[in-house]
Structures are given as C-alpha cells and as structure tokens.
Image (spheres, rainbow, N blue to C red):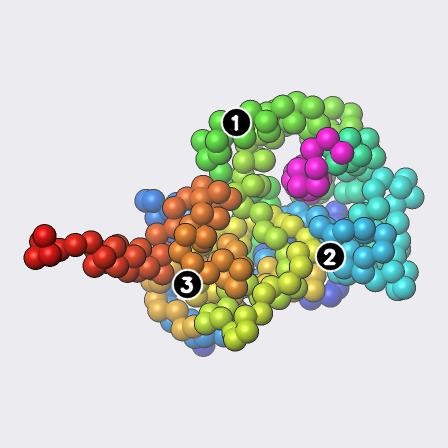
C-alpha cells in the first residue's frame, strides 16, 4: 500500500477564499508528469493502476456558468469558486446587489460574503461590458472573455494573500511537487503560434477593447500576456457536463454526457492529452472539481489520456479528426485513429485494380 502523500481539508468545509491557494485536492501517487517530444506535457503512471482507481481530483482555477436564461435555470452554479454547487431558485439564491449579470448568483449569504473580494474584481467589468460583448460578439466570446476575467480574479485573490497566511495546499505526490497557483496557469500550453493568424488578430482587438489593464480591470498585466492567456484558455478549458466523458465501449443505445452547464480551467487536469480510445473517464463532481478515473487497468509507463469530446457524438475517423483539428489544432494520431487510417488505406488499395486485372 502506498503511503498517503497528500490530504487536504474536507472539501465540504467552508473555505475563506482569501486563504485559498487554488490547488488539486488529490493526485494519485502513481500519476506523474512527463514530456513527449511531439505532444509536450503529458500524464503517465509509474506503477500499475487498476481499473476504477481515482487518479486526480482537481479544483478549477476559474469556472463560469454556461446556461440559458440563468434567472430561471436551476443548473446555474454558485459563483463562489470554493463552492460551485447548483443554486436551485427555491433554495434561496443570492443575487449580486449591484445587479451586474443574472449569471452571477450564490447558493447562500455565506458563499456571497466569502466571495466578495474576488467578485468585486469582476463586477464592474461585467456590468459595463457583458451587454455590448454579448450583443456584438455573441455568447461564445462573452464566455471566453469572462473566463479570462475570472482567471485574473483568482490571481488577484491569490496575490492578496500568500498561501503562508492560510491553509497550505501544495500537493506533493510521488516526490513530485505539483504547483497549482497562477504559476501552473503560466505553464499551460497554447500560444499565438497555435492559432490561425486571423483568429489571433481578432483576439488582439478584443483584448485592446475589453481586457486592458485599467480601473475597471486592474490586473497589472500587459496586453501581450492577456492575449497569450486567451491562447492558453482556448487550448485548455474544459466544458462541464453532468455525465461522464470517455466511456468505452459505447452503451447501446449510447448515452451522451448531457447538456453543458459550465466551463473551467484546471491547473493540473489540463496536462492530459487526448485519445479517441482514452484510458481515463472524466467528470466534474458536485463542486466543479474535475475527477479522473481509470477506465481500465493502466500499465506502468503508459500515458493517461482523456477524450476531448463526447465519444457518443463523433464516431467515425473523419468527424473525430476534423473536430480535433478545428478546435484543438492537431491531427489525432491515437491508436484508434492510426488503425482506422490503415484500414481505410488498405480498403482503398483493395478497391484499386491490381496489375493482374490490367
Ligand atoms: Zn455556494
Ligand atoms: Zn456583481
Ligand atoms: Zn484519435
């Protein structure tokens, strides 16, 4: 039995945000980070991990709700990042006294007051820019920009109170130190080289228009750093869905992962690469933490991968590769794609007239 290398406070304990250094709550001692010359950062395991083992529970650095008509939607999550629970209307939802946006709500007065310092950072920005951004650029870009603002808001709260003043939640696992504060966000992949030139130009303009360092958004970072942060966020953010992603074989009939209710950036879970035949199932828990579970026995040295999309929705090789190329800018060469590609090629060869037929 491996020694317990990391424990943290009970996640149900109310947490004062000022005391938080956002961090992972659990990392299995066999889970290690390594680097691949082509893929970059990746997860591997250093010992056998049996099927069903929980490998990672990672608290988001920033999360936003993604729901239609938030006023009447019971799936709207609590704005306190230490909570993130659903805020059912009949259970006494608390709204922002400055009425910034109806997407901001807390599940209790306690959650609101805990979150006051962080929310103040985003409140003026939301009140001023949410309307124009939503009407001019649409809901997707509003969500992207709000997630950026929330990343900056967590950083703002992190800078105010160094971890030494509160609970130290640094993770040590397998002699590896996992840093999960802003420095982990700095390490996320994605740069202006990752995205098409036109896309980067459009983001440059919206940074200038909506995310400049000023009294509405006092982040103190350069426009270039914010542009880089958008490139990182777009390459690393997770959609949050009520059911698991990555279950194979598909059930009959297939059960999809359900409606998206939030989007988040995770400092550690973001290291996971994609496979169309993943050995990890992922799903957020009721507080928005991303949970990785082994879907089969994983052998020492094997890479741990998740699926970046719903496997019940994109099934054939072309649609999977097209989606990954469009949204994540890479050509999937996973085991499944490689074998299906070979199959297609050999079918094509079979269909061609052979020398004997000529
Ligand atoms: Zn709450
Ligand atoms: Zn507000
Ligand atoms: Zn693939």
* Foreground residue among 157 and 120: 120
**In the rendered image, which quarter contains the N terminus?**
bottom left
Which segment did they paint magenta?
135-154
**Numbered disc in front, either 2 or 1:** 1
Return the disc, 2 or 1, that comes first in the chain's sequence. 2
* Crowding at mark 2 (Cα within 10 Å: few <14, some 14-19, many 20+): many
- Residue receiving disc 3: 277
Q: Which mark is residue 198?
A: 1
Choose mark 3 or mark 2, whichever is in front. Answer: 3
Magenta span includes 287: no
Outermost residue toward the front in this view = 358
CB at mark 3 closer than 8 A to ligand 3?
A: yes
Q: Where is residue 118 in the image (x, y as percent from the top left)?
A: 77, 43
Q: Is mark 3 on a helix, strand or loop?
A: loop
Mark linked to residue 84: 2
> Does the magenta run of residues contain 146?
yes
Which of the two discs, 3 and 1, labels the residue nearer the N terminus?
1
Choose between 159 and 203: the one closer to the eye: 203
Disc 3, disc 1: CB below 8 Å? no
């Amino acid at each position: 039995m491996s020694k317990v290398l990391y424990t943290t406070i009970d996640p149900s304990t109310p947490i004062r945000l000022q005391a938080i250094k956002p961090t992972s709550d659990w990392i299995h001692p066999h889970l290690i980070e390594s680097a691949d010359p082509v893929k970059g950062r990746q997860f591997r395991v250093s010992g056998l991990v049996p099927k069903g083992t929980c490998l990672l529970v990672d608290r988001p650095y920033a999360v936003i709700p993604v729901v239609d008509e938030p006023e009447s939607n019971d799936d709207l999550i609590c704005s306190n990042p230490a909570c993130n629970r659903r805020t059912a209307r009949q259970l006494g939802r608390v709204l922002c006294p400055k009425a910034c946006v109806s997407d901001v709500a807390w599940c209790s007065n306690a959650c609101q007051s805990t979150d006051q310092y962080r929310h103040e950072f985003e409140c003026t920005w939301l009140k001023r820019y949410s309307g124009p951004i939503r009407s001019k650029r649409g809901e997707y870009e509003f969500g992207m920009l709000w997630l950026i603002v929330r990343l900056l808001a967590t950083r703002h709260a992190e800078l105010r109170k160094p971890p030494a003043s509160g609970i130290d939640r640094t993770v040590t696992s397998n002699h590896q130190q996992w840093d999960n504060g802003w420095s982990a966000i700095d390490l996320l992949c994605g740069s202006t080289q990752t995205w098409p030139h036109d896309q980067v130009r459009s983001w440059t303009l919206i940074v200038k228009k909506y995310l400049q360092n000023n009294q509405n958004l006092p982040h103190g970072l350069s426009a270039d750093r914010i542009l880089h942060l958008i490139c990182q966020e777009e390459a690393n953010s997770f959609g949050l869905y009520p059911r698991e992603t990555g279950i194979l074989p598909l059930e009959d009939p297939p059960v999809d992962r359900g409606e998206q209710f939030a989007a988040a950036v995770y400092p550690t879970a973001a290291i996971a690469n994609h496979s169309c035949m993943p050995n990890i199932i992922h799903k957020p828990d009721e507080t928005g933490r991303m949970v990785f579970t082994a879907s089969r026995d994983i052998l020492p040295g094997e890479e741990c991968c998740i699926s970046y999309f719903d496997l019940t929705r994109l099934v054939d090789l072309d649609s999977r590769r097209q989606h990954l190329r469009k949204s994540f800018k890479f050509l999937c060469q996973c085991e499944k794609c490689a074998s299906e590609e070979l199959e297609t090629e050999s079918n094509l060869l079979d269909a061609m007239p052979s020398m004997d037929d000529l």
